[in-house]
Amino acid sequence: MEMDEVVRALNEQGLLSDDEPLRSEELRQRFDSMVLPDGANGIGLTYRPMGEETPYVILGESAPEGTSVLADRFPLLLIIDGRSTPVMLEVRAW
Amino acid sequence: MVMRRDRRGMAVLVDALLFLTVLTLMGAFLMVPENTSETDDTGERVGAFHEVMLGGEVPGGDGSALSRTSLEDHLVLLSQDHEGPSSYEMGRVEQAVNGTLREMGSMGWDAWCVLIIDWTDHVFGRQYPGQDVSVHADRRELADSAVICTLFAIV
């Protein structure tokens, strides 16, 4: 499994976008119906406001101990309370 | 006598060929860009941060629809104000930019943003003074170049 495949899956399923803001209230539903990319056993996503540590939304669970985890983070726009807000998405896949 | 002269001529020829081969190999080695994929990827990442920063809504304002604009639209509006942007408006811009700079800083990057509105520079973040490192930059020109916004990063 490569991070590129994970990113492609997240883009296809509306959990990450390069070009248009995503609606925050739709994230959980999209995550619940997400199809994992080939070779992935689990995925965890954390959305937090840009430059801040406190998460806005956490989706999924932590990786089991001893598992090799792929991790990266990506900037995107999320509509929160009607405002287009810069956020960071932290991705962990195992 | 003739044989000796031929041998010396051959030796000179071989030396010259060896020299040219070494020179060619060194030239090729020097011309290969170091770590190209990482450099390209960093440029793309700086561009992605810049895109999101400009697309985000400017914090604050009076709550009216007009005050709720993306940073990009806000900068264009500021450039059309003949008296120049007020310190209040520049404070809002600073708030909009700082989250991105903090985030890039948390990744171990030195990042700053230079905004030129009507030929006046506004610098956000700590501008790196040296010239001995590679700096990645993403530059956007808005409103017929009345606004130029450049995001810099040293990785």
Image (tube, coloured by chain):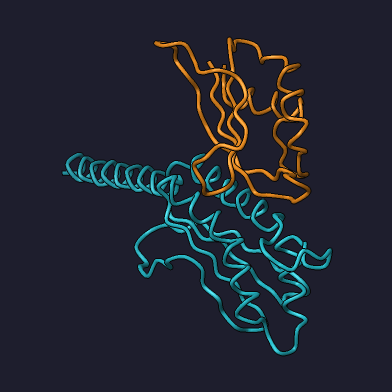
Chain colours: A orange, B cyan
> Percent x, y for residue B24?
39, 46
> Percent x, y for residue B110?
42, 56
Q: Could you tell whether A16 is left or right of B10 in the image?
A: right
Q: Tell me which residue sits at (69%, 74%) in the image.
A: B147
Residue A43 quadrant: top right
B147 or B63, which is in the foreground?
Answer: B63
> Percent x, y for residue B144?
78, 75
Q: Could you tell whether A74 is left or right of B23 in the image?
A: right
> Percent x, y for residue A38?
65, 11
Q: Could you tell whether A83 is left or right of B109 in the image?
A: right
Residue reaching furthest front? B62
Q: Could you tell whether B107 is left or right of B62 in the image?
A: left
B140 or B96, which is in the foreground?
Answer: B96
Image quadrant occupied by the N terminus of chain B: top left
Q: Is residue B82 above or below residue B127?
A: below
Residue B88 quadrant: bottom right
Q: Tell me which residue sits at (33%, 43%) in the image.
A: B17
B52 or B152, which is in the foreground?
Answer: B52
